[in-house]
Amino acid sequence: MRHASITSLAHRDAYVFEVTSVKKQSLDRFLSFISGVPETKAGLRVVNRGLQYSSRAVLEPYVAGVSAWINGRTAAERIPSYLLEYLEAGVRYYHAREWRTSIVLSAIALETLLAEMYEHEFRQLAPDEPLGALKDEIMILSKKRGKPTAFPSDILEWIKKTNEARIASVHRASRELSGREALEAVRGLLRVISWYHGLC
């Protein structure tokens, strides 16, 4: 189901589904589908339905939207296949709750995109540096060429968020990673891809 997130909980007395959707129609289609299954029709009960405004709830369908976008025509026409493959893998690991792998794949893809940007802009091989250092190098060389900045401020912020998630994922930390960090990394990658390829 596009633009919706479905999670389930197997309880000893029932199956509980939490469905978060961007559009009401997606939720209606899910309820229609579930109510059409003979085994569930008699015991189907909607516990709570309404608008949600928390960032957790609002971001739930984001990954489903990314999955739909990856398979769309615009992405196929405008985005290099290697980026789509990384993005798809990052989303797949996100769904599998493999936060660390999802983050690392997003960061590798973003680092590769910045290296491509570096080579296109400066006509030389990109240095073998991690994401944050490569971003800094692009900014320094751009400034030397008289450009006030290489990246818009919002894109710099998304690069920073993805890099912070990468650092947290590859270094031992006092806290466990969560889906939030993985989602930030995926979002950062998608925002930079969209900006660089003129989709926003």
Image (spheres, grey):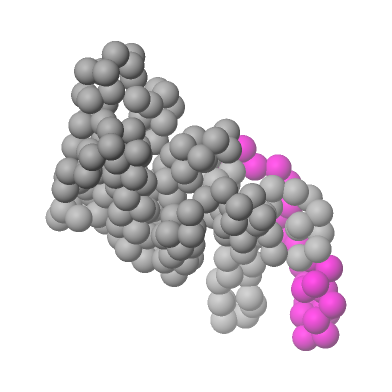
| Residue at 64% from the left image edge and 67% from the top image edge | 17
**Percent x, y of residue 24:** 78, 50
Relative height, residue 31 to residue 173 (above, below): below
| Residue at 48% from the left image edge and 59% from the top image edge | 81
Query: Is 60 one of the magenta-colored residues?
Result: no
Question: Is the N terminus in the top left, top right, bottom left or bottom right quadrant?
Answer: bottom right
| Residue at 76% from the left image edge and 65% from the top image edge | 30
Most frequent secondary structure within the magenta stretch: loop
Q: Quadrant of residue 179?
A: bottom left
Question: Is the C terminus in the top left, top right, bottom left or bottom right quadrant?
Answer: top right
Q: Quadrant of residue 45?
A: bottom right
Q: Write the start and end of the magenta stretch as one range.
A: 31-54
Relative height, residue 92 to residue 87 (above, below): below
Q: Report the residue that reaches farthest toward the front.
A: 123
Nearest the eye: 115 or 48: 115
**Percent x, y of residue 35:** 82, 74
Nearest the eye: 49 or 142: 142
| Residue at 65% from the left image edge and 42% from the top image edge | 52
